[in-house]
Image: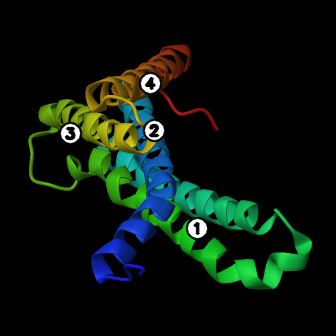
């Protein structure tokens, strides 16, 4: 006797698409915060943070989703017609996973917060979210949640540090002036 209950069906769907969501979330958080950190390191305006942040968030999310879609359709040419719908769902899970947590670093630039607190708030919110997504990754990868959370937190912090340093260096090399 098989159990086709709605809760079993939901668990199956979650297991199938959670890796795509977590992969997207990890990249969405890290790349968006890297943009924020690079712009902050360069000392550019909040407007630049928002424009570059949203452009990167949506373009990178779309790119990852379509890449996931194409990867899901690749395994067998003869199955391509039957793989289209599941592949689209994988792509959608990656896009939602990328954009939903990926917006976190930009929230500090959308809420009424004094300018001097925007970057530290974005950093704190991003680091907490990275840890939470990493802990979720631990559930999928059968790792201790704290370890997976710390791994993702460390990778994200390193990427942000690199981006901040590049922004700072770029600003120093151009004397804080945009080069055209």
Tell me what residue is drawn at x 82 percent, y 78 percent: 80
Q: Choose mark 1 or mark 2, whichever is in front.
A: 2
Disc 1: which residue: 91
Q: Choose mark 4 or mark 3, whichever is in front.
A: 4
Question: Could you say whether the residue bearing mark 3 is in a helix, strand or loop?
Answer: helix
Given residues 83 and 111, the one toward you in this image is 83
Q: Earlier in the sequence, mark 1 or mark 4?
A: 1
Q: Mark 4 to mark 2: distance in Å?
A: 17 Å
Disc 3: which residue: 125
Q: Can you give x and y, in whole percent of width and height, for residue 77 in the image? A: 90, 72
Q: Mark 2 to mark 3: distance in Å?
A: 24 Å
Q: Can you give x and y, in whole percent of width and height, for residue 139 in the image? A: 35, 42
Q: Earlier in the sequence, mark 4 or mark 3?
A: 3
Are dots 1 and 2 in contact, CB under 8 Å? no
Q: Mark 1 to mark 4: distance in Å?
A: 24 Å
Are dots 4 and 2 in contact, CB under 8 Å? no
Given residues 73 and 103, the one toward you in this image is 73
Q: Earlier in the sequence, mark 1 or mark 2?
A: 1
Are dots 1 and 3 in contact, CB under 8 Å? no
Q: Choose mark 4 or mark 2, whichever is in front.
A: 2
Are dots 4 and 3 in contact, CB under 8 Å? no
Disc 2: which residue: 141
> For the residue carrying disc 4, how many other residues have a C-alpha within 10 Å: few (<14), some (14-19), or many (20+)?
some
Tell me what residue is drawn at x 65 percent, y 60 percent: 68
Relative height, residue 107 to residue 89 (above, below): above
Given residues 152 and 127, the one toward you in this image is 152
Q: Is residue 101 left or right of residue 91?
A: left
The circle on residue 155 is 4
Q: Residue furthest front?
A: 1
Question: Could you say whether the residue bearing mark 4 is in a helix, strand or loop?
Answer: helix
Q: Is residue 9 left or right of residue 173?
A: left
């Amino acid at each position: 006797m098989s159990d086709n209950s709605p809760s079993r069906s939901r668990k199956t769907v979650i297991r199938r698409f959670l890796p795509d969501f977590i992969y997207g979330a990890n990249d969405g958080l890290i790349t968006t915060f890297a943009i924020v950190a690079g712009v902050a390191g360069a000392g550019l305006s909040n407007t630049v943070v928002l424009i570059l942040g949203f452009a990167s968030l949506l373009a990178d999310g779309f790119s990852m989703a379509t890449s996931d879609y194409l990867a899901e359709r690749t395994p067998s040419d003869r199955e391509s017609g039957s793989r289209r719908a599941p592949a689209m769902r994988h792509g959608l899970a990656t896009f939602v996973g990328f954009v939903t947590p990926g917006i976190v670093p930009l929230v500090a630039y959308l809420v009424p917060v004094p300018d001097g607190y925007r970057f530290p708030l974005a950093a704190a919110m991003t680091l907490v979210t990275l840890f939470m997504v990493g802990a979720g990754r631990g559930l999928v990868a059968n790792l201790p949640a704290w370890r997976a959370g710390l791994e993702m937190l460390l990778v994200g912090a390193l990427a942000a540090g690199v981006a901040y340093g590049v922004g700072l260096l770029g600003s120093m090399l151009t004397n804080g002036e945009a080069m055209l």
